[in-house]
Image (tube, rainbow, N blue to C red):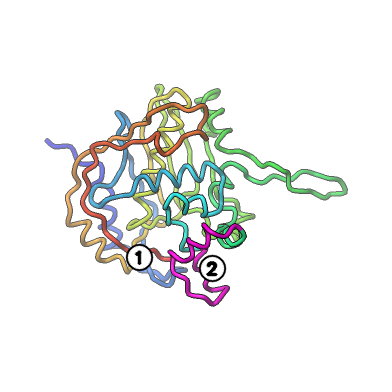
């Protein structure tokens, strides 16, 4: 009996949401079909990685984004310099609305790269993922009931690595980007918001909980990135990778992604890609894109679909 391909659970969920999902209005005005509370599990042993094969996924872009998160940066300039465009739509939309201009993405990114002041003003996303991950703000008393923001916040990632190394059976191996006090200052509140880790039998498993997931576009990056982070943490903590548990609140498909759903569901998953890491750097923050390689990846063609901003 042939084992079910790891991607089939995703395709089943995609079909289920599209056929049975509650049709809803959303903040983008596009509309979605949505189901609440799905969970999937992916085996990460033997270098396995949950990389979708029914369409080509730009996994290097996802890896570059993860490294950008870990750097704590909140400005798109560092991404644009690497040819990564996945965060540009939000500041571009904000700029065009504020200025009355109608710059396209290429023109906007050219200004981001050429003009330091423009990049500082319009490339900034607010205190999104990386800021919360490695520099969660804390406040210190200055007397008379007054507080000031400390120069350096809490590095949740560094604390997580220390916790995994020194207290592996803890139930507190968690980090999150959901800082309630700063949500309104973010270009987009965190969708992949809370990560938890579990050590058993010398293996590290990770659980990602998303409050919201765009199954057509976002999931492919979210799952690969979460698996990559498990692998990086496991290497840093002398553990073997276990599994990735992906769980979501609002799992949805945008109404203008009908063509994507039809095309992807018509395709059969194929192959089983492997993710390898070429070296073990000194810390979780010292990986580079050249450290990662994916082999055995033979996906179907990319499927273009619009991003809802």
In-image side of 141 versus 269 (left or right):
right
Where residue 290 sits, quadrant-wise, is top left
Q: Is residue 214 above or below residue 99?
A: above
In-image side of 192 versus 162 (left or right):
left
Report the disc number at residue 157.
none
SS label for mark 2: helix
User: Is residue 94 shown in magenta?
Assistant: yes
10 Å crowding of disc 2: few (<14), some (14-19), many (20+): few
Residue at position x 56%, y 48% from top?
A: 73
Q: Quadrant of the C terminus?
A: bottom left
Predominant SS of the magenta segment: helix
Please state the horizontal and vertical placement of residue 79, each as a whole percent of the image. 47, 51
10 Å crowding of disc 1: few (<14), some (14-19), many (20+): few
The first of marks 2 and 1 along the sequence is: 2
SS label for mark 1: loop
Report the disc number at residue 94.
2
Q: Quadrant of the N terminus?
A: top left
Q: In the rendered structure, which segment of residues is drawn in magenta?
A: 91-116
CA distance for labels 2 and 1:
18 Å
Per the image, the residue denoted by label 1 is 306
**Residue sitting nearer the eye, 208 or 93:** 93
Please state the horizontal and vertical placement of residue 14, each as a whole percent of the image. 28, 56
**Residue sitting nearer the eye, 170 or 71:** 71
Residue at position x 23%, y 51% from top?
A: 54
Please state the horizontal and vertical placement of residue 118, each as a whole percent of the image. 59, 62
């Amino acid at each position: 009996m042939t084992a079910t391909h790891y991607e089939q659970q995703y395709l089943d969920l995609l079909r289920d949401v599209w056929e049975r999902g509650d049709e809803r209005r959303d903040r983008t005005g596009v509309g979605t079909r949505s189901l609440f509370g799905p969970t999937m599990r992916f085996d990460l042993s033997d270098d396995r990685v949950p990389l979708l094969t029914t369409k080509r996924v730009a996994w290097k872009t996802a890896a570059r984004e993860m490294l950008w998160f870990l750097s704590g940066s909140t400005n798109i300039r560092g991404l644009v310099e690497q040819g990564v465009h996945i965060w540009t739509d939000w500041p571009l939309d904000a700029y065009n609305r504020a200025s009355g201009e109608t710059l396209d993405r290429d023109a906007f990114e050219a200004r981001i790269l050429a003009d330091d002041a423009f990049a500082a003003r319009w490339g900034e996303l607010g205190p999104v993922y990386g800021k919360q991950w490695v520099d969660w703000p804390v406040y210190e008393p200055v007397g008379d009931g007054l507080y000031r923001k400390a120069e350096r916040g809490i590095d949740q990632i560094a604390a997580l690595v220390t916790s995994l190394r020194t207290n592996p059976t803890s139930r507190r191996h968690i980090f999150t980007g959901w800082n309630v006090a700063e949500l309104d200052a973010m270009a987009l509140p965190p969708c992949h918001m809370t990560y938890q880790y579990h050590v058993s039998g010398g293996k590290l498993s990770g659980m990602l909980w998303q409050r919201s997931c765009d199954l057509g576009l976002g999931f492919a990056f979210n799952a690969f990135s979460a698996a990559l982070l498990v692998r990086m943490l496991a290497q840093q903590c002398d553990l073997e990778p276990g599994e990735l548990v992906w769980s979501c609140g609002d799992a949805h498909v945008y109404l203008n992604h009908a063509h994507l759903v039809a095309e992807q569901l018509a395709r059969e998953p194929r192959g089983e890609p492997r993710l390898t890491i070429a070296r073990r750097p000194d810390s979780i923050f010292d990986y580079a894109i050249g450290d990662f390689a994916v082999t055995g990846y033979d996906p179907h063609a990319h499927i273009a679909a619009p991003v809802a901003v």
